[in-house]
Protein backbone atom coordinates (compact mmCIF):
# COMPACT_ATOMS: atom_id res chain seq x y z
CA UNK A 1 0.00 0.00 0.00
CA UNK A 2 1.52 3.33 -1.03
CA UNK A 3 1.53 6.22 1.43
CA UNK A 4 0.82 9.58 -0.18
CA UNK A 5 2.68 12.59 1.10
CA UNK A 6 0.09 14.97 2.64
CA UNK A 7 0.71 17.52 -0.11
CA UNK A 8 0.97 15.22 -3.11
CA UNK A 9 -1.01 16.29 -6.20
CA UNK A 10 -3.58 13.49 -5.85
CA UNK A 11 -4.21 14.53 -2.24
CA UNK A 12 -4.60 18.18 -3.25
CA UNK A 13 -7.10 17.27 -6.00
CA UNK A 14 -9.06 15.25 -3.48
CA UNK A 15 -9.15 18.21 -1.09
CA UNK A 16 -10.27 20.56 -3.83
CA UNK A 17 -13.02 18.09 -4.76
CA UNK A 18 -14.03 17.79 -1.13
CA UNK A 19 -14.22 21.58 -0.78
CA UNK A 20 -16.39 21.71 -3.88
CA UNK A 21 -18.67 19.21 -2.18
CA UNK A 22 -18.40 21.00 1.14
CA UNK A 23 -21.90 22.40 0.97
CA UNK A 24 -23.34 18.95 0.20
CA UNK A 25 -21.31 17.30 2.93
CA UNK A 26 -22.57 19.88 5.40
CA UNK A 27 -26.13 19.13 4.31
CA UNK A 28 -25.89 15.40 5.04
CA UNK A 29 -25.83 15.62 8.86
CA UNK A 30 -28.39 18.42 8.65
CA UNK A 31 -30.76 16.21 6.69
CA UNK A 32 -30.44 13.28 9.08
CA UNK A 33 -31.04 15.62 12.01
CA UNK A 34 -34.08 16.96 10.20
CA UNK A 35 -35.33 13.43 9.50
CA UNK A 36 -35.09 12.70 13.22
CA UNK A 37 -37.70 15.37 13.96
CA UNK A 38 -39.47 15.32 10.60
CA UNK A 39 -43.03 13.95 10.48
CA UNK A 40 -45.51 13.70 7.65
CA UNK A 41 -49.03 12.34 7.31
CA UNK A 42 -50.24 10.90 4.00
CA UNK A 43 -54.03 10.60 3.61
CA UNK A 44 -55.30 8.27 0.88
CA UNK A 45 -59.01 8.77 0.21
CA UNK A 46 -60.83 5.82 -1.36
CA UNK A 47 -63.66 7.60 -3.18
CA UNK A 48 -66.96 5.78 -3.61
CA UNK A 49 -66.94 3.83 -0.34
CA UNK A 50 -64.53 0.91 0.00
CA UNK A 51 -65.99 -2.46 0.97
CA UNK A 52 -64.18 -2.91 4.29
CA UNK A 53 -65.92 -6.24 4.93
CA UNK A 54 -63.94 -7.81 2.06
CA UNK A 55 -60.79 -5.80 2.79
CA UNK A 56 -60.18 -7.53 6.13
CA UNK A 57 -62.05 -10.77 6.88
CA UNK A 58 -62.33 -12.89 10.06
CA UNK A 59 -60.75 -16.34 9.72
CA UNK A 60 -61.80 -18.12 12.94
CA UNK A 61 -64.37 -20.85 12.25
CA UNK A 62 -67.38 -19.20 13.92
CA UNK A 63 -67.02 -15.72 12.44
CA UNK A 64 -65.88 -16.95 9.01
CA UNK A 65 -69.02 -19.13 8.83
CA UNK A 66 -71.20 -16.11 9.72
CA UNK A 67 -69.34 -14.01 7.12
CA UNK A 68 -69.62 -16.63 4.36
CA UNK A 69 -73.33 -17.21 5.03
CA UNK A 70 -74.27 -13.52 4.70
CA UNK A 71 -71.75 -12.61 1.99
CA UNK A 72 -72.83 -15.57 -0.17
CA UNK A 73 -71.45 -15.10 -3.70
CA UNK A 74 -69.25 -12.19 -2.50
CA UNK A 75 -67.49 -14.25 0.20
CA UNK A 76 -63.75 -14.60 -0.31
CA UNK A 77 -62.63 -18.25 -0.01
CA UNK A 78 -60.96 -18.77 3.37
CA UNK A 79 -57.88 -20.30 1.74
CA UNK A 80 -57.40 -17.19 -0.44
CA UNK A 81 -57.06 -14.80 2.52
CA UNK A 82 -53.64 -13.54 3.59
CA UNK A 83 -53.65 -14.33 7.31
CA UNK A 84 -52.32 -11.38 9.33
CA UNK A 85 -49.62 -12.92 11.50
CA UNK A 86 -51.14 -15.48 13.87
CA UNK A 87 -54.38 -13.49 14.23
CA UNK A 88 -57.94 -14.46 13.35
CA UNK A 89 -58.05 -11.96 10.46
CA UNK A 90 -56.88 -12.05 6.86
CA UNK A 91 -56.47 -9.44 4.13
CA UNK A 92 -58.08 -9.64 0.70
CA UNK A 93 -55.60 -11.55 -1.50
CA UNK A 94 -55.25 -8.48 -3.74
CA UNK A 95 -53.56 -6.75 -0.77
CA UNK A 96 -50.87 -9.45 -0.49
CA UNK A 97 -48.14 -6.79 -0.80
CA UNK A 98 -49.16 -5.48 2.66
CA UNK A 99 -48.82 -8.76 4.57
CA UNK A 100 -45.03 -8.35 5.04
CA UNK A 101 -45.69 -4.88 6.52
CA UNK A 102 -48.06 -6.41 9.07
CA UNK A 103 -45.47 -9.09 9.88
CA UNK A 104 -42.93 -6.28 10.48
CA UNK A 105 -45.34 -4.51 12.88
CA UNK A 106 -45.86 -1.55 10.54
CA UNK A 107 -49.54 -2.04 9.63
CA UNK A 108 -52.57 -1.37 11.84
CA UNK A 109 -56.20 -2.20 11.08
CA UNK A 110 -58.70 0.22 12.62
CA UNK A 111 -62.10 -1.47 12.86
CA UNK A 112 -65.53 0.14 12.51
CA UNK A 113 -64.65 3.83 12.37
CA UNK A 114 -66.93 6.54 10.97
CA UNK A 115 -68.46 9.99 11.55
CA UNK A 116 -69.98 10.32 15.05
CA UNK A 117 -71.01 13.31 17.14
CA UNK A 118 -70.55 11.26 20.34
CA UNK A 119 -70.57 7.55 21.28
CA UNK A 120 -73.82 6.08 19.98
CA UNK A 121 -75.67 2.87 20.83
CA UNK A 122 -78.21 1.21 18.59
CA UNK A 123 -81.01 2.06 21.06
CA UNK A 124 -79.96 5.74 21.01
CA UNK A 125 -79.76 5.73 17.20
CA UNK A 126 -83.26 4.21 16.86
CA UNK A 127 -84.76 6.64 19.40
CA UNK A 128 -82.99 9.65 17.88
CA UNK A 129 -84.01 9.05 14.25
CA UNK A 130 -82.02 12.08 13.13
CA UNK A 131 -83.82 14.50 15.45
CA UNK A 132 -80.68 15.64 17.31
CA UNK A 133 -76.98 16.16 16.68
CA UNK A 134 -76.40 12.57 17.86
CA UNK A 135 -77.11 11.26 14.35
CA UNK A 136 -74.73 12.65 11.70
CA UNK A 137 -76.61 14.31 8.80
CA UNK A 138 -77.25 12.69 5.39
CA UNK A 139 -75.96 9.25 6.30
CA UNK A 140 -75.30 6.92 3.32
CA UNK A 141 -74.90 9.88 0.90
CA UNK A 142 -71.58 10.04 -1.00
CA UNK A 143 -71.01 13.78 -1.15
CA UNK A 144 -72.10 14.47 2.44
CA UNK A 145 -70.19 11.58 3.99
CA UNK A 146 -67.04 12.47 2.06
CA UNK A 147 -67.25 15.95 3.63
CA UNK A 148 -67.77 14.46 7.13
CA UNK A 149 -64.69 12.25 6.75
CA UNK A 150 -62.51 14.92 5.12
CA UNK A 151 -63.58 17.61 7.59
CA UNK A 152 -63.70 15.35 10.70
CA UNK A 153 -66.99 16.93 11.69
CA UNK A 154 -70.70 16.15 11.73
CA UNK A 155 -71.47 19.29 9.72
CA UNK A 156 -72.06 18.43 6.07
CA UNK A 157 -71.66 22.16 5.28
CA UNK A 158 -68.13 22.30 6.75
CA UNK A 159 -65.99 24.52 4.53
CA UNK A 160 -62.63 23.26 5.77
CA UNK A 161 -60.87 19.89 5.85
CA UNK A 162 -59.07 18.56 8.91
CA UNK A 163 -55.77 18.43 7.01
CA UNK A 164 -56.14 22.08 6.00
CA UNK A 165 -57.16 23.20 9.50
CA UNK A 166 -54.23 21.31 11.01
CA UNK A 167 -51.71 22.82 8.58
CA UNK A 168 -52.97 26.32 9.48
CA UNK A 169 -53.26 25.84 13.25
CA UNK A 170 -49.95 23.97 13.63
CA UNK A 171 -48.23 26.63 11.50
CA UNK A 172 -46.92 24.24 8.83
CA UNK A 173 -44.55 25.87 6.36
CA UNK A 174 -46.51 24.55 3.37
CA UNK A 175 -50.25 23.96 2.93
CA UNK A 176 -51.49 20.41 2.44
CA UNK A 177 -49.59 18.97 -0.54
CA UNK A 178 -52.06 17.15 -2.76
CA UNK A 179 -50.80 14.65 -5.31
CA UNK A 180 -54.44 13.65 -5.93
CA UNK A 181 -56.31 16.79 -6.96
CA UNK A 182 -58.14 19.47 -5.01
CA UNK A 183 -59.80 17.44 -2.20
CA UNK A 184 -61.84 19.00 0.62
CA UNK A 185 -59.36 17.49 3.14
CA UNK A 186 -56.72 20.15 2.35
CA UNK A 187 -58.91 23.28 2.61
CA UNK A 188 -58.35 25.76 5.44
CA UNK A 189 -60.15 29.08 6.01
CA UNK A 190 -57.59 30.97 3.92
CA UNK A 191 -55.74 28.38 1.84
CA UNK A 192 -56.29 25.59 -0.66
CA UNK A 193 -53.93 22.61 -1.00
CA UNK A 194 -50.81 22.80 -3.16
CA UNK A 195 -51.88 20.52 -6.03
CA UNK A 196 -48.98 18.68 -7.68
CA UNK A 197 -49.50 16.98 -11.08
CA UNK A 198 -48.18 13.55 -12.06
CA UNK A 199 -44.66 12.70 -13.26
CA UNK A 200 -44.06 14.11 -16.76
CA UNK A 201 -46.53 16.98 -16.32
CA UNK A 202 -45.62 20.66 -16.08
CA UNK A 203 -46.11 22.40 -12.75
CA UNK A 204 -46.73 26.15 -12.66
CA UNK A 205 -48.72 28.87 -14.36
CA UNK A 206 -49.86 27.61 -17.76
CA UNK A 207 -47.51 28.80 -20.50
CA UNK A 208 -45.29 30.67 -18.03
CA UNK A 209 -42.70 28.06 -17.04
CA UNK A 210 -38.97 28.68 -17.46
CA UNK A 211 -39.03 27.18 -20.97
CA UNK A 212 -42.01 29.29 -22.08
CA UNK A 213 -40.69 32.69 -21.04
CA UNK A 214 -37.82 32.54 -23.52
CA UNK A 215 -40.47 34.02 -25.84
CA UNK A 216 -40.72 37.75 -25.04
CA UNK A 217 -44.56 38.10 -24.89
CA UNK A 218 -44.71 35.28 -22.32
CA UNK A 219 -41.95 36.92 -20.26
CA UNK A 220 -43.97 40.17 -20.24
CA UNK A 221 -47.11 38.25 -19.26
CA UNK A 222 -45.28 36.65 -16.33
CA UNK A 223 -44.04 40.08 -15.19
CA UNK A 224 -47.62 41.40 -15.31
CA UNK A 225 -48.96 38.43 -13.29
CA UNK A 226 -46.22 38.92 -10.69
CA UNK A 227 -46.97 42.65 -10.48
CA UNK A 228 -50.67 41.94 -9.88
CA UNK A 229 -49.86 39.41 -7.17
CA UNK A 230 -47.46 41.83 -5.48
CA UNK A 231 -49.97 44.71 -5.26
CA UNK A 232 -51.10 45.58 -1.75
CA UNK A 233 -54.63 44.36 -1.05
CA UNK A 234 -57.29 46.00 1.06
CA UNK A 235 -59.03 42.87 2.41
CA UNK A 236 -57.78 39.84 4.35
CA UNK A 237 -59.26 37.44 1.85
CA UNK A 238 -57.65 39.16 -1.16
CA UNK A 239 -54.36 39.26 0.74
CA UNK A 240 -54.60 35.55 1.53
CA UNK A 241 -55.39 34.80 -2.12
CA UNK A 242 -52.39 36.85 -3.31
CA UNK A 243 -50.10 35.19 -0.75
CA UNK A 244 -51.24 31.81 -2.01
CA UNK A 245 -50.53 32.84 -5.60
CA UNK A 246 -47.09 34.20 -4.65
CA UNK A 247 -46.20 31.07 -2.68
CA UNK A 248 -47.52 28.85 -5.44
CA UNK A 249 -45.49 30.61 -8.13
CA UNK A 250 -42.32 30.52 -6.03
CA UNK A 251 -42.77 26.84 -5.23
CA UNK A 252 -43.62 25.87 -8.81
CA UNK A 253 -40.44 27.58 -10.07
CA UNK A 254 -38.47 25.73 -7.42
CA UNK A 255 -40.16 22.33 -7.74
CA UNK A 256 -41.19 22.29 -11.42
CA UNK A 257 -38.21 20.27 -12.69
CA UNK A 258 -38.53 17.74 -9.83
CA UNK A 259 -42.29 17.30 -10.30
CA UNK A 260 -41.90 16.76 -14.07
CA UNK A 261 -39.13 14.14 -13.70
CA UNK A 262 -40.12 10.58 -14.58
CA UNK A 263 -38.45 7.34 -13.44
CA UNK A 264 -35.00 6.80 -14.93
CA UNK A 265 -34.64 10.36 -16.24
CA UNK A 266 -31.49 12.35 -15.56
CA UNK A 267 -31.47 13.46 -11.94
CA UNK A 268 -34.19 11.05 -10.78
CA UNK A 269 -33.62 9.41 -7.40
CA UNK A 270 -32.38 5.86 -8.04
CA UNK A 271 -33.57 4.65 -4.61
CA UNK A 272 -37.13 5.85 -5.27
CA UNK A 273 -37.08 4.38 -8.78
CA UNK A 274 -35.86 1.02 -7.42
CA UNK A 275 -38.61 0.97 -4.77
CA UNK A 276 -41.30 1.65 -7.40
CA UNK A 277 -39.75 -0.75 -9.96
CA UNK A 278 -42.69 -3.22 -9.74
CA UNK A 279 -44.99 -0.43 -10.97
CA UNK A 280 -42.72 1.03 -13.66
CA UNK A 281 -42.98 0.10 -17.34
CA UNK A 282 -41.35 1.98 -20.25
CA UNK A 283 -40.27 4.83 -17.98
CA UNK A 284 -43.77 5.41 -16.59
CA UNK A 285 -45.43 4.55 -13.29
CA UNK A 286 -48.37 2.41 -14.40
CA UNK A 287 -51.19 3.12 -11.90
CA UNK A 288 -52.87 6.34 -10.78
CA UNK A 289 -52.18 5.83 -7.08
CA UNK A 290 -48.67 4.63 -7.97
CA UNK A 291 -48.00 7.93 -9.78
CA UNK A 292 -49.34 9.93 -6.82
CA UNK A 293 -47.23 8.12 -4.23
CA UNK A 294 -44.17 8.31 -6.51
CA UNK A 295 -44.63 12.10 -6.53
CA UNK A 296 -45.13 12.13 -2.75
CA UNK A 297 -41.88 10.17 -2.28
CA UNK A 298 -40.01 12.73 -4.44
CA UNK A 299 -41.48 15.62 -2.43
CA UNK A 300 -40.62 13.93 0.87
CA UNK A 301 -37.06 13.44 -0.39
CA UNK A 302 -36.69 17.24 -0.84
CA UNK A 303 -38.67 18.06 2.31
CA UNK A 304 -36.16 20.82 3.25
CA UNK A 305 -37.06 22.70 0.03
CA UNK A 306 -40.69 22.82 1.11
CA UNK A 307 -39.59 24.06 4.54
CA UNK A 308 -40.62 23.09 8.04
CA UNK A 309 -40.45 19.73 9.76
CA UNK A 310 -44.15 18.79 9.46
CA UNK A 311 -46.04 18.07 6.23
CA UNK A 312 -49.45 16.70 5.29
CA UNK A 313 -50.14 14.98 1.95
CA UNK A 314 -53.33 13.95 0.17
CA UNK A 315 -53.74 11.19 -2.44
CA UNK A 316 -56.80 9.36 -3.72
CA UNK A 317 -58.19 6.39 -5.61
CA UNK A 318 -61.69 6.52 -7.15
CA UNK A 319 -64.11 3.83 -8.29
CA UNK A 320 -65.09 2.15 -5.01
CA UNK A 321 -68.85 2.60 -5.48
CA UNK A 322 -69.34 -1.09 -6.20
CA UNK A 323 -73.15 -1.47 -6.41
CA UNK A 324 -72.67 -3.96 -9.23
CA UNK A 325 -69.91 -6.12 -10.73
CA UNK A 326 -67.93 -5.91 -7.50
CA UNK A 327 -66.61 -9.34 -8.48
CA UNK A 328 -65.67 -10.73 -11.88
CA UNK A 329 -65.64 -14.38 -12.95
CA UNK A 330 -64.85 -15.08 -9.30
CA UNK A 331 -64.31 -13.05 -6.11
CA UNK A 332 -60.58 -12.72 -6.80
CA UNK A 333 -61.26 -10.70 -9.96
CA UNK A 334 -63.51 -7.76 -10.76
CA UNK A 335 -63.63 -4.10 -9.77
CA UNK A 336 -62.90 -4.38 -6.06
CA UNK A 337 -59.96 -6.77 -6.38
CA UNK A 338 -58.38 -4.60 -9.11
CA UNK A 339 -58.70 -1.43 -6.99
CA UNK A 340 -57.30 -3.11 -3.87
CA UNK A 341 -54.38 -4.49 -5.86
CA UNK A 342 -53.50 -0.99 -7.13
CA UNK A 343 -53.73 0.34 -3.57
CA UNK A 344 -51.74 -2.45 -1.88
CA UNK A 345 -48.97 -2.56 -4.48
CA UNK A 346 -48.52 1.24 -4.46
CA UNK A 347 -48.47 1.37 -0.64
CA UNK A 348 -45.81 -1.35 -0.50
CA UNK A 349 -43.64 0.49 -3.06
CA UNK A 350 -44.11 3.78 -1.20
CA UNK A 351 -43.10 2.22 2.12
CA UNK A 352 -40.00 0.70 0.46
CA UNK A 353 -39.09 4.14 -0.93
CA UNK A 354 -39.49 5.74 2.52
CA UNK A 355 -37.23 3.07 4.02
CA UNK A 356 -34.60 3.77 1.34
CA UNK A 357 -34.82 7.51 2.09
CA UNK A 358 -34.44 6.94 5.84
CA UNK A 359 -38.00 8.18 6.40
CA UNK A 360 -39.80 4.94 7.31
CA UNK A 361 -40.37 6.07 10.92
CA UNK A 362 -41.21 9.65 9.95
CA UNK A 363 -44.20 9.14 7.63
CA UNK A 364 -47.58 7.66 8.57
CA UNK A 365 -50.00 6.77 5.77
CA UNK A 366 -53.70 6.12 6.38
CA UNK A 367 -56.89 5.51 4.42
CA UNK A 368 -60.24 7.30 4.54
CA UNK A 369 -63.38 6.61 2.49
CA UNK A 370 -66.98 7.84 2.11
CA UNK A 371 -68.38 5.01 4.25
CA UNK A 372 -68.34 1.24 4.55
CA UNK A 373 -70.64 -0.95 2.50
CA UNK A 374 -73.48 -3.24 3.46
CA UNK A 375 -72.45 -6.59 4.92
CA UNK A 376 -75.33 -8.18 2.98
CA UNK A 377 -74.79 -8.07 -0.81
CA UNK A 378 -77.44 -6.61 -3.10
CA UNK A 379 -78.96 -8.46 -6.08
CA UNK A 380 -76.32 -7.20 -8.55
CA UNK A 381 -73.20 -8.92 -7.17
CA UNK A 382 -72.41 -5.71 -5.35
CA UNK A 383 -72.90 -3.87 -2.07
CA UNK A 384 -74.75 -0.71 -1.05
CA UNK A 385 -73.94 2.34 1.09
CA UNK A 386 -73.36 1.81 4.80
CA UNK A 387 -71.60 3.65 7.66
CA UNK A 388 -68.77 2.30 9.85
CA UNK A 389 -65.76 0.94 7.99
CA UNK A 390 -62.33 -0.65 8.51
CA UNK A 391 -59.20 1.35 7.63
CA UNK A 392 -55.47 0.81 7.11
CA UNK A 393 -52.72 2.78 8.87
CA UNK A 394 -49.09 2.06 8.00
CA UNK A 395 -45.59 3.33 8.70
CA UNK A 396 -42.58 2.76 10.92
CA UNK A 397 -44.15 4.70 13.81
CA UNK A 398 -47.32 2.58 13.68
CA UNK A 399 -47.94 0.03 16.43
CA UNK A 400 -49.04 -2.83 14.19
CA UNK A 401 -52.14 -4.81 15.09
CA UNK A 402 -55.89 -4.40 15.47
CA UNK A 403 -57.73 -1.43 16.96
CA UNK A 404 -61.34 -0.67 17.73
CA UNK A 405 -64.19 -3.18 18.01
CA UNK A 406 -64.95 -5.57 15.16
CA UNK A 407 -68.75 -5.60 14.63
CA UNK A 408 -70.93 -8.55 15.64
CA UNK A 409 -71.63 -10.24 12.29
CA UNK A 410 -75.39 -10.46 12.81
CA UNK A 411 -77.90 -8.79 10.50
CA UNK A 412 -80.18 -6.75 12.75
CA UNK A 413 -77.68 -7.30 15.59
CA UNK A 414 -76.34 -4.71 18.08
CA UNK A 415 -74.07 -3.01 15.51
CA UNK A 416 -76.51 -2.99 12.56
CA UNK A 417 -78.68 0.14 12.22
CA UNK A 418 -81.55 -2.06 10.99
CA UNK A 419 -84.37 -3.68 12.99
CA UNK A 420 -87.09 -4.66 10.46
CA UNK A 421 -86.13 -7.44 8.05
CA UNK A 422 -85.98 -5.12 5.00
CA UNK A 423 -83.38 -2.88 6.70
CA UNK A 424 -81.20 -5.66 8.13
CA UNK A 425 -78.30 -5.12 5.75
CA UNK A 426 -75.32 -4.85 8.09
CA UNK A 427 -74.71 -1.10 8.07
CA UNK A 428 -72.53 -0.77 11.15
CA UNK A 429 -72.92 2.00 13.72
CA UNK A 430 -69.29 3.12 14.21
CA UNK A 431 -67.63 2.28 17.52
CA UNK A 432 -64.72 4.67 16.86
CA UNK A 433 -65.10 8.18 15.44
CA UNK A 434 -63.35 10.08 12.67
CA UNK A 435 -62.44 12.65 15.36
CA UNK A 436 -60.58 10.00 17.39
CA UNK A 437 -58.91 8.69 14.23
CA UNK A 438 -57.75 12.20 13.25
CA UNK A 439 -56.73 13.03 16.84
CA UNK A 440 -54.54 9.90 17.01
CA UNK A 441 -52.72 10.93 13.83
CA UNK A 442 -52.43 14.63 14.67
CA UNK A 443 -51.33 13.82 18.24
CA UNK A 444 -48.45 11.83 16.73
CA UNK A 445 -47.64 14.91 14.61
CA UNK A 446 -47.28 16.88 17.84
CA UNK A 447 -50.64 18.64 18.22
CA UNK A 448 -51.34 19.52 21.88
CA UNK A 449 -54.56 18.56 23.70
CA UNK A 450 -55.79 22.16 23.33
CA UNK A 451 -54.98 22.24 19.61
CA UNK A 452 -56.83 18.95 19.10
CA UNK A 453 -59.93 20.38 20.81
CA UNK A 454 -59.79 23.39 18.48
CA UNK A 455 -59.24 21.26 15.36
CA UNK A 456 -61.81 18.58 16.23
CA UNK A 457 -64.82 20.15 17.97
CA UNK A 458 -66.55 16.78 18.61
CA UNK A 459 -63.48 15.18 20.21
CA UNK A 460 -64.48 16.37 23.70
CA UNK A 461 -67.66 14.24 23.42
CA UNK A 462 -65.53 11.08 23.63
CA UNK A 463 -64.19 11.85 27.11
CA UNK A 464 -60.78 10.37 27.86
CA UNK A 465 -60.88 8.06 24.78
CA UNK A 466 -59.13 10.64 22.61
CA UNK A 467 -56.51 8.42 20.99
CA UNK A 468 -57.17 5.08 19.30
CA UNK A 469 -53.59 4.06 20.10
CA UNK A 470 -52.27 2.85 16.74
CA UNK A 471 -49.25 5.24 16.67
Image: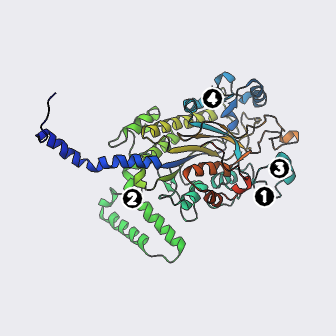
Is there a contact, CB below 8 Å, between mark 3 and mark 1? no
Residue carrying label 2: 207
Q: Is residue 196 left or right of residue 462?
A: left
Give neighbour class at mark 4: few <14, some 14-19, many 20+ (Cα, 10 Å).
many
Classify residue 338 by image quadrant.
top right
Q: Secondary structure at mark 3?
A: helix
Name the foreground residue: 208 vs 440: 440
Nearest to viewer (mark 4 / mark 3): 4
Measure the alpha-carbon separation of dots 2 and 1.
49 Å
Q: Which mark is residue 125?
A: 3
Measure the alpha-carbon separation of dots 2 and 4.
50 Å
Mark before the other along the chain sequence, 3 or 1: 3
Residue carrying label 4: 84
Nearest to viewer (mark 2 / mark 3): 3
Q: Position of residue 261 (x, y in %)?
A: 38, 45
Give neighbour class at mark 2: few <14, some 14-19, many 20+ (Cα, 10 Å).
some
Nearest to viewer (mark 1 / mark 4): 4
Amino acid sequence: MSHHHPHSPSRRRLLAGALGLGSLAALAPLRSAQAADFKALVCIFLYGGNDGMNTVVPMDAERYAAYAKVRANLALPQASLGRLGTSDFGLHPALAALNPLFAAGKLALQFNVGPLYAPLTKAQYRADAGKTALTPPSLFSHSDQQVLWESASTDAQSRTGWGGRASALLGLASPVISVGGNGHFGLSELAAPLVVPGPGDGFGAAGLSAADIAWKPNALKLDAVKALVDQSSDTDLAGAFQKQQRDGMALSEQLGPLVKRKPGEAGSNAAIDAAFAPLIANGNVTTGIGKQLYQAAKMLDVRATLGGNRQIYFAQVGGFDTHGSQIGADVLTGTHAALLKQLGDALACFQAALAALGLAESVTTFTQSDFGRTFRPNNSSGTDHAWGNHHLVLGGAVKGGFYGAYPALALGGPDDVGVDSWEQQGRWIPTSSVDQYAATLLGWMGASAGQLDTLLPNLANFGSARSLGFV
